[in-house]
């Protein structure tokens, strides 16, 4: 299929259960942009700008990677590029931003990846300006987190999205670019620190893939309870071989098989 053929509404099941909207076994929530803007501002006021940026970037990253796993598993696209382009299509369909891509370069063997374009009507820039006025730096933190994760899942290497222009700074649109983490300069340091624990070890992100493969909401809840995931941060698991081994053993006890080994 083509990325333009992807229709979020077609597989978004409203009322799968009372109070539950579902997309491919993943519960989906709908929030008013104003409420998200207020939550965003509360994070800034409470945690400070740097920690709020880190939190929202990670929020976007988790959302983007979960979406990539679900789409890659459940849909058959005509080409690699069509799969990649499904990410911007989802971003647009969710009402977060309108995406226009202008650059694409991918060489899997050489580990080269470039992807870029424009964001129009960014909800995040809009909400930032409402509460703070125009910023001096780009502010679409969750959007860049989402793009970073989607493209990292696609390219199977750590890549990072950053804005060179942002509507939150007074520009007409947001201009973004994605490339491998090690090709960015010092300006990328805060964003890299925010997500490095996703990439430490050999293939830590395979754990996220493994979780995504477990069918049904009940299965995911049971797995989370048994492995203590709600209380265990990824950074803790990464820094402790003992925690990783306990995590793998718990999954084996539940499912009768062990997840990918780091």
Image (cartoon, grey):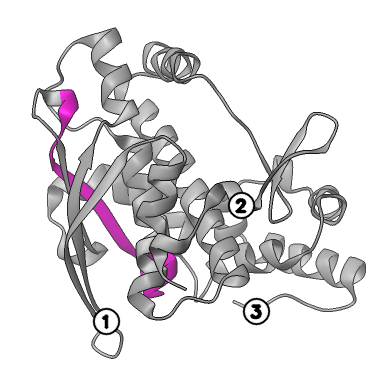
* Residues shaded magenta: 152-168
Residue 212: x and y in percent read: 67, 62
Camera-nearest label, 2 or 1: 2
Residue 69 occupies quadrant? bottom right
In this rendering, the answer to whether 94 lies above or below 69 is: above
Badges 3 and 2: C-beta atoms under 8 Å apart?
A: no
Task: Quickly name the residue at label 3.
Answer: 261
Foreground of the two, 2 or 175: 2
Res. 53 mark: none
Quote the CA–CA distance across marks 2 and 1.
35 Å
* Element under disc 3: loop
Task: Quickly name the residue at label 1.
Answer: 111
Residue 227 is left or right of residue 122, and the answer is right
Q: Which residue sits at x=37%, y=46%?
A: 145
Task: Quickly name the residue at label 2.
Answer: 10
Camera-nearest label, 3 or 2: 2
Q: Which residue sits at x=47%, y=76%?
A: 77
Q: Quadrant of the C terminus?
A: bottom right
Q: Earlier in the sequence, mark 3 or mark 1?
A: 1
Judge whether residue 149 is colored magenta: no
In this rendering, the answer to whether 226 lies above or below 204 is: above
Residue 117: x and y in percent read: 17, 53
Residue 166: x and y in percent read: 15, 33
Q: Which of marks 2 and 1 is nearer the N terminus?
A: 2
Q: Which residue sits at x=84%, y=64%?
A: 250
Residue 243 occupies quadrant? bottom right
């Amino acid at each position: 299929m083509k990325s333009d053929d992807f229709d979020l509404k077609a597989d978004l099941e409203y009322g799968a259960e009372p109070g539950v909207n579902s997309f491919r076994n993943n519960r989906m929530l709908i929030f008013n942009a104003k409420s998200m803007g207020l939550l965003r501002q509360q994070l800034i006021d409470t945690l400070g700008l740097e920690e709020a940026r880190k939190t929202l970037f990670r929020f976007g990253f988790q959302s983007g990677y979960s979406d990539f796993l679900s789409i890659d598993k459940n849909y058959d696209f005509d080409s690699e590029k069509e799969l990649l382009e499904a990410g911007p299509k989802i971003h647009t369909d969710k009402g977060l931003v309108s995406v226009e891509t202008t650059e694409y370069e991918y060489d899997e063997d050489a580990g080269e990846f470039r992807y870029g374009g424009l964001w129009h009507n960014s909800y995040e820039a809009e909400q930032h300006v409402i509460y703070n006025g125009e910023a001096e730096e780009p502010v679409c933190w969750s959007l860049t987190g989402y793009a970073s994760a989607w493209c990292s899942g696609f390219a199977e290497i750590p890549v990072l999205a950053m804005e060179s222009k942002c509507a939150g700074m007074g520009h007409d649109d947001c201009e973004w670019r994605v490339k491998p983490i090690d090709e960015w300069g010092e300006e990328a340091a805060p964003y890299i620190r925010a997500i490095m624990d996703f990439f430490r070890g050999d293939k830590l992100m395979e754990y996220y893939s493994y979780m995504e493969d477990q069918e049904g909401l009940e299965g995911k809840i049971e797995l989370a309870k048994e492995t203590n995931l709600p209380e265990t941060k990824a950074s803790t698991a990464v820094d402790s071989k003992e925690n990783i081994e306990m995590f793998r053993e718990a999954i084996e006890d539940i499912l009768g098989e062990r997840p990918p080994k780091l």
